Image (cartoon, helix red, strand yellow):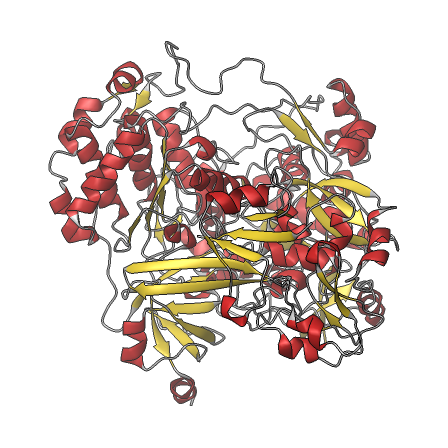
Amino acid sequence: MANRRDFIKISLYGAGAMAAGAGGYKLIKAISSGEAGKKLVVDLKRTPTYCEVCFWKCAGWVYKNSEGKIWKIVGNDEDQHCNGRFCPRGTGGVGMFYDEDRLKTPLIRVEERGKQVFRKASWDEALDYIATRMKEISVKYGPESMALFTHGSGSGYFTTLFKSFGSANIAEPSYAQCRGPRDEAFLATFGEEAYSPEITDIRDTRCLVLIGSHIGENMHNGQVQEMSDAIDKGATIITVDPRFSTAAGKSKFWLPVKPATDLALLLTWIHEIVYNDLYDKKYVEKYCTGFYKLKEHVKDFTPEWAYGITTIKPDIIRKTAKEMGDAAPAVIVHPGRHVTWYGDDTQRIRAIAILNALLGSWGRRGGFYRPSKFSLPSYSLPPFKAPAKSWTDLFPGKYSIASSPVSNVLIDASIPENNPGYPIKGWIVNGTNLINTIPDQANTLKAIQYLDLLVAVDTMPMEITGWADVILPECTYLERYDVLRASPHRKPAIALRMPATDPMYDSKPGYWIARELSKRLILQNYFPFEKQQELLDWQLKKTGSSLEEMQRIGVKTFEREVDDLYFSEDEQVGFSTDSGKIELYSAYFEGAGFDPLPKYIPHDEPAEGFYRLIYGRAPMHTFSRTSNNPNLTDLMDENSVWINPVVAKEWGLKTDQYIWLKNQDNIISDFPVKVRVTERIRWDSIYMVHGFGHKDKLLTRAFGRGVSDTQLITNVLVDPLMGGTGMRSNFVTFLTEKEVQEVAS
Amino acid sequence: MRYAMAVDTRKCVGCSDCVVACQTENNVPIGFCRDWVIEVMDGTYPQLEMEIRSERCNHCANAPCVRCCPTGASRIEEGGIVAVEHNVCIGCGACIASCPYDARYPHPAGYVDKCTFCIHRIRNGMTPACVDVCPTKCLYFGDLDDRNSDITAVLKRRKSKTLIPEAGTDPHLYFLK
């Protein structure tokens, strides 16, 4: 089929708009000696914010210099997420604001002389265009044929817009591409998820077990801080990872597990803990159900059985199980966060949940604390019309335990030949670069060709914007008000984000964008406040604070109503599961047709000359969204491919040499990547940091730098329980420059 | 008064927050830095050890950069802080060549720049920006002459080392093992 929608490099900006951006960042003179230094500290105005560089949302202060320009961002001492200390990405958040490659004006796709180009548009024109197309789709197919893909603080505004429009097809890739299996596994076991920030009581733990979780490379700030506190206090860290991660470097035990066999190790740990009486008998008796079925189930999963599968020696498995048992209940088998690996992820995380239950760590000091969340006053809105069809009607019976819409399902339903229950015809994509977020890029690009409308709301010209019909430039978090942050934590708290400066260029806050669209769809009753700050002031006054007070303090922490951070000695705890108990054996999964207890199933292994592609994070980057940030690219401007020295020798590869990667489906990386020969990786795997290899030339610092792991992830193992996209079953081999040229010719 | 810094290599995760906080605090131009992170690996798979260090000027008591500076721009300030007076520096680079720790860089504006332990912050009762921001709290800063300071306590409690002690520079940047 002919391309209805070509990828457009946004080259037709008004030249004026570009010029306006270039002069934005003037460095004030560096001061190395004392006298002038004093001046920097006085006369500084600070405004509160919470960070949007990642989902941890640390609260801090934005300082301006004597010229009134944004200078630096530092943590708010009162904030539980960061304790006054931002991570490198938050500190480098200034680069998001000053990035001269930002989207600067609304753009509309038009055809000129047979070629598709973006034309600069006014906001009115762009919003009218979107509203008209949305109405057309609604009339022709029904409002539920519009889908929203969203990430970040602005999600709520577009969610309200969609619900009032009549569509509940609202998906966050953070579910099916990231933490979804974890949430479902914990819900099934404890009746509660692991939350964000995670309710792991790391600061008081005696034993922290990380299954592929690379705290310290993922800079989930509070967790990194607490891991450091735990190291100070002499806690044991056990790291299970095919790579010698930073956390592994701090661990008493590093278990370099064979990839895709984690579940076998977990089942064996359960076996050891059950059969060696290392579990918390009183806790299990009181709170859990299904223990004897579990005991029978794990009977044969001995350390010797696991050795042949995981390559971890039996005595190490025994020692580490004992270590956990001795530390219990102050032990955390960490639930992880990005856990969509092999398609049996919900079951793997179930094994983690079961381990925690056996060790009695849920609800205990040094295990998992009970979170408390500030409940924000809500204002009354007209009732939302129940959507005629939901996302579960797209492919009935699939992913029946998913509690949130699955992004990849909405994408699949945009392709007519998949015979969805009804078609998805329009997307609004807010703050998520779907091309680098959803694996199997060819499938996403195919779906895009069938759409009647694709709108991208972003701050940067990410790959997804090149496929949009309309691009709406959002201002950065430093230039806008947003919802109050009221995340669960040890104490309930709220945090304010307010603009440190007016929006640069012709960019607008998400709230304004959603509300303007609502007006055009005659849905403005759902946005009763003209401006975000009016809503905030109304909410804050209801809680006995005010916008003025929050502008001064940034964060307000409240005491818990009840002193119940941990279970008390004789507490009768009711769990939100069907049985009201912690379900070691999941009757819920069984009823839905899935294994009530996790089973190890072997996965594919790399063919001769191929290596499993493992990806992860660098502490100075968040996904692909920071890879053009001037401050953060200064720390790391490309990824590299980690190769074990034995493998490198076999291939004649040297550190710093550039090579191309080819995967099992003959996909060759668009760009070359630097080799890093290191002992820190197994010989059956390679590793790279996610988020590089951008293809949009408008990202002047990120374009062509390194390799996109997403491009090489074409074999996707979908979790049958909840639709998560397992991405770690892809295998790559190496091509040197010469060979690539030969292939090309 | 004798200022010093200690880096806990057991806690440092090498996130480089110290680098970016220094860059923004001190308006260090993109492409340059006053502090940086080093990762040292030892062993072969799977018997591995890793040390991560946040490094910067060692504020040496016997500082070769100060001795070799032809204009007197490089000098020792209160508490032994080695600093450069930008207006007096001619950018000759002798100090860069003399520093065994490679702690100095030529600023594009024509002078040599380096870590000052954020002297402008210390004078206002604050700690250096890198210490203040570090998420792992692996950086300790203070006065070695003050018996009650954090740094005195941590250096007493823990084993530590300095870098290139054989250079005889009497460095004041310690690494806790």
Q: Position of residue A29 (x, y in %)?
A: 82, 64
The quarter of the displayed image where residue A182 is located? top left
Q: How many marks?
A: 0
- Say if residue A475 shows up in the picture: no
Q: Is residue A179 above or below residue A745?
A: above
Residue B110, by quadrant, is bottom right
Q: Is residue B162 left or right of residue A181?
A: right
Q: Position of residue A145 (x, y in %)?
A: 56, 44
Q: Is residue A684 above or below residue A506?
A: below
Q: Give whichever of A129, A529 is nearer the camera.
A: A529
Q: Is residue A55 above or below residue A691?
A: above
Judge from the rendering whether residue A435 lies leftward or rightward of residue A400; answer left or right.
right
Image point (68%, 72%), residue name = B65
Is residue B3 or residue A447 the one in the foreground?
A: B3
Residue A562, placed above or below residue A556: above
* Relative to A718, B131 lies left or right: right
x then y, percent, for residue A396:
39, 38
Which of the 4 image quadrants contains residue A675? bottom left
Q: Which residue is painted at 38% across and 10% down in the image? A: A572
